[in-house]
Amino acid sequence: MQHLTLFTLAITLIATICLAKSPYQSVLQHSRIRGRQHGPNVCAMQKIQGTDKKYFTNCKQWYHRKICGKPTVISYECCPGYEKLSGEKGCPAALPLVNIYNTLGVVGAATTKMYSERAQLREEIEGPGSFTFFAPSNQAWAALPTEILDALVSNVNIELLNALHYHMVNRRLTSEDLKHGSAFPSMYQDFNVHIHHYPNGIVTVNCARLVKTDQHATNGIVHVVDRVITAVTNNVHTFIDTDDDLETLRTAVAAAGLTQMLESDGHYTVFAPTNEAFEKIPPEMLKRILGDPVALRDLLNYHILKNMQCAESITSGTPLETLQGTVLEVGCDGSDMTLNGKAIIQKKDQLGTNGVVHYINELLIPDSAKTLLELAQGSAVTTATKLFVDAGLGSHLSGSEALTILTPQNEAFKEGVTMTGELKKLLKNHILKEQLSSGVLYHRQELETLGGIKLRVLVYRNSLCIENSCIAAHDKTGRFGSMFTVDKVLTPPMGTIMDVLKADDQFSLLVGAIQTAGLTELMNQAGPHTVFAPTNDAFSALPKADLNKLMGNPQELASVLKYHMAKEILVSGGVGSHTRLKPLQGDKLELNMRNQTVYINKVPVVEADLMATNGVVHAVGAIIKPLCKSNRPCEDAGGNRYKGIYIHSKTKATAPKPP
């Protein structure tokens, strides 16, 4: 029965919200559903603790119990247009339908009612007509700076009357009529009031939030707002052009050719860096950007959103697209508006006819305006960045060459790594001779480095690698170059697989075995090959008699060795939880990754990713045995348990019989 009730509630919630005509109506419907257990026409409201700010609730806020990162408490109040009756549950009675003047007194706008009488507006809003009044709440008037309020009330017949008329529209506008981006002529010289209706259900007029909507009256409708609004006459460029705190920005806008755009019609949000914000940037970096029209335009467009975003519209972090093409996370922390998690906004909601300006005290520099060195310095690859500079490669990374840098994560380096000639050479091979995006890389593609060698691209189901180094983070695309963060220090290929094995003493027995089995030519061919190379210890672990027997039978030895080889290239970063390889001889090899170690048929790799020009070598500490379906050691057709020497290629392997 309980499950049926929950199901019915869910269906009702979905149906009513889907039928809602606007985002505001959606959150209102949700609040009604959450409040209906307390009686008819009760809405659940979320109030930020320690403040008077209340919101109709949506699903996300209801379960998180947070707005702007601050905890909320739930209160249950009469939905718009209803009131309580003594002795009855909920809010069963509709508010009496009276004129606008009298409505102001019962919806939390008594101060507006008082000033309407002082300004001799009472007769107008009591009389015939059809008006919309965006009425400042009592708290809105109390928050108005004293000097502004004094100026208004000292000249009630002109200044105060004009201010109140600017809050009025000479037609009835319900919340359904308040469309996003719409504007309506006010009753003060037809100056427009600007409406924004956001997806989270918040509605603003001139960036003031509607806190009580759709309070109907006989001669119109009242919407209570959280601040006193003022007439808007200038575009957003005017703020930049006339404010001395934005002098550097003004110069930059002109140099980038953005003046005309900021004067044109639109709904922009401009995060305007102050002079102080520009002064925080290293002088050389700032000079370079200001002198580069492409970088400068990218920098400025990164401060401009495609849509108008008032501070009151934000209740949680939201990614919003900029004119530069990437996103900023616009959020809030209590009363502070934030950008990318930082409370750097000094002045909010400077409204223009074509958008809004928020002043910020920190310059936002997009990756597209940075050099490679600046990209690296701003990322979690500090060890690699220092080593590139120490290796004398800083000029390549701070210049205008089209390059791609492979930067290993800090944990890829051993502690206390110091610069050597070999390391300098290695780091030079971490820089590719062209600017690339990971999205255009393809399998077996070859990339040339500054060191003059070719690196291979290896594409796997869940990873993209360049030799043994796999890309561990999204690309960073700078002004001239790109940066790929990789999980390992690159191991460039050094000779064929046979060369790699001969150069490492731990494979001396394997080298002899390959030669005995007649596989030397195969290990020098173009490939690609993956070789799981048993170390000397792996061979020594076999019983001496078995080892001698194996080494004395080239055909059997070749079968064993070919089971350790595959005709494709698989680096450790390409191994997933269940990866299979087809060996040169035999059925399959089962690979998986556990605790950063690769296992082949349950045999651990002791040293991975020894790169060769024709493939890759992985050292294993034991001879790899075939696995049967039961994952137990196989037996031959005669029932002899497999002990470490490979079954002849013509012998059928079967799972052991249960005891």
Image (cartoon, rainbow, N blue to C red):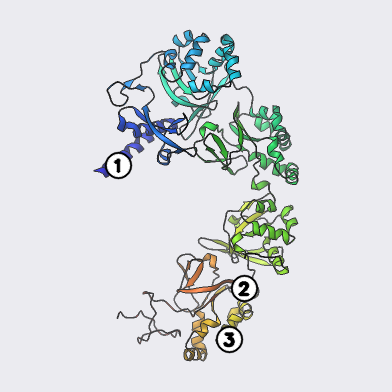
Between the residue at mark 3 and the residue at mark 1, the CA separation in whole angstroms equals 72 Å
Question: How many discs mark residues in the rendered view?
Answer: 3
The residue at which mark 1 appears reads as 6
On screen, residue 301 above or below 377: above
User: Within 10 angstroms of label 2, few (less than 14), some, or many (20 or more) residues?
Assistant: many
Q: Residue at x 48, y 87 (%)?
A: 556
Dividing the picture into quadrants, the one containing residue 38 is top left
Q: Nearer the viewer, residue 371 or 347?
A: 347
Name the disc covering residue 612, or none: 2
User: Within 10 angstroms of label 3, few (less than 14), some, or many (20 or more) residues?
Assistant: some
The residue at which mark 3 appears reads as 512
Q: Are marks 2 and 1 in contact (CB under 8 Å)?
A: no
Between the residue at mark 2 and the residue at mark 1, the CA separation in whole angstroms equals 62 Å
Q: Position of residue 648 (x, y in %)?
A: 44, 86
Q: Position of residue 467 (x, y in %)?
A: 60, 66
The kind of secondary structure element at disc 2 is: strand
Q: Could you tell me the amino acid type at mark 1?
A: Leu
The kind of secondary structure element at disc 3 is: helix
In the rendered structure, which disc, 2 or 1, sits on the residue that comes first in sequence? 1
Q: Quadrant of the C terminus?
A: bottom left
Residue 655 visible in image? yes
Q: Position of residue 456 (x, y in %)?
A: 62, 66
Q: Nearer the viewer, residue 421 or 147?
A: 147
In the image, taking residue 357 as reference, residue 106 lies left or right, namely left
In the rendered structure, which disc, 2 or 3, sits on the residue that comes first in sequence? 3
Please name which of the two marks, 3 or 1, marks the residue nearer to the observer: 1
